[in-house]
Image: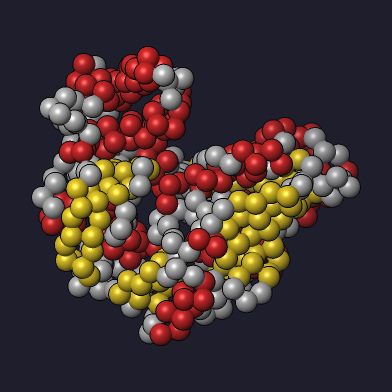
Amino acid sequence: MAKITMTVNGRQVSGSCDDRTLLVHFIRENLGLTGTHVGCDTTQCGACVVHMDGQSVKSCSILAVQAAGSSITTIEGLAANGELHPVQAAFKAHHGLQCGFCTPGMVMTAVDIIRRHGSGLDEATVRAELEGNICRCTGYHNIVQAVLAAAAGMGGARQAAE
Amino acid sequence: MYETNYHRASSVEEAVKLMGAAAEGKYLSGGMTLIPTMKQRLAAPTDLVDLRHIAEMKGIAVDGRSVRIGAATTHEEVAASAALAAVCPALCGLASRIGDPHVRHMGTIGGSIANNDPAADYPAAMLALDATIVTDRREIKAGDFFTGLFETAIENGEIVTAVRFEAPARAAYQKFANPASRYAMAGVFVARRDDGAVRVAVTGAGADGVFRHPGLEAALAANWSPDAVANVTIDASALLSDLHASAAYRANLVKVLAKRAVAAA
């Protein structure tokens, strides 16, 4: 058993787990944060995407012990003060989901895409960047629209703040 | 996944020591191949020695045309390196098409070449760039490093710490990605030196893993143009046949990708 500490959604958490425990299971079962999903469990689908030290990663393919000492953000950590994160709001406004199972990973991925590309995103880039996230409802059209809208909105907000 | 014991190394020396004390240990870098393989119970190391926190194994240094990339440098860091893009954009482009963004945030160049998956992208680049693989105990030319399917010259406990190469005058990598896995069904890296010497390395297609193609190299050394590739015969007998593609299909892909790579270089 390993005793590990990490920061999850801004809060320091500790827990015990096997060395072989996957990060996604530590998040879901030890911390009770079930917004992060297990879709395929084979590194393909991206339902388990969280941010580790600011970068999107697949939490089904990382051991919890590998993440010890890091800062993790899950889907539960995006909204602040009762307000949806702009990407979450854009997914709602553009109906960027059908069954919703892939949505946490899609939203976490979208936040990372916008972090790296800023507001100058185009549709082709968004589609290429969503390569690691599978929507089995095949609802990509509205997801792409939501990411583009969020990027435009967040870029505008950033410019206004500067 | 079978039980395992995790260790985090903060230096190369510590990693070697930890591995020496392990029964059947494996080094863990980004883990984008190893962890999924362990989940499938195709690998069951008693111990994992994590190399991801060893500062001396990270980063990209470019001095003139000389490039050194630390083994623990991620695909994303290679893809996004402005210094590297200035001298060898082909390698940035290659890294930007490995897996998906999340995999690129974890996976490392050292892990990729040490694993030597026959469909991985980096081995083709290392071979075509005539790179030197630096380990904790020696330096190995890429031509001597990749020895077969998932096989390298690495000995027990040895760690790939960096790769070094001189940036060529022109280079490009083109791959035909499997639509599901994004691994190369065939990938061709072409590199041309200032003196006109050409190296062409093929991944994803060889029955024994990555290989150089002397016929393509000779044709392109004589005439650096996509037309020169048209008259080269790609022997399908040493190529891979599987459910994704026959050897004959891969032979044709190699030719098409070599033309595209020369056009893009």
Residue at (33% x, 35% y) in the render:
A109
Q: How is the image coloured?
A: secondary structure
Residue at (61% x, 55% y) in the render:
B69
Figure quadrant of residue B70:
bottom right
Marker count (numbered): 0
Q: Quadrant of the N terminus of chain B?
A: bottom left
Q: Quadrant of the C terminus of chain B?
A: top right
* Apparent side of residue B34 relative to residue A136 in the rendered image (left or right): right
- Residue nearest the viewer, comparing B45 with B260: B45
Percent from the top left, x then y, of residue A42?
A: 30, 52
Residue B97 visible in the picture: yes
Residue at (44% x, 32% y) in the render:
A116
* Apparent side of residue B72 relative to residue A7 in the rendered image (left or right): right
Figure quadrant of residue A90:
top left
User: Does residue B61 sit above or below B17 in this rendering?
Assistant: above
Percent from the top left, x then y, of residue B185?
A: 53, 47
User: Does residue B4 sit above or below A154 in this rendering?
Assistant: below
Residue B212 visible in the picture: no
Percent from the top left, x then y, of residue B123?
A: 60, 56
Percent from the top left, x then y, of residue A57?
A: 34, 46
- Residue nearest the viewer, comparing B20 with A73: A73
Figure quadrant of residue B226:
top right
* Apparent side of residue B248 relative to residue A85 in the rendered image (left or right): right
Residue at (71% x, 45% y) in the render:
B190
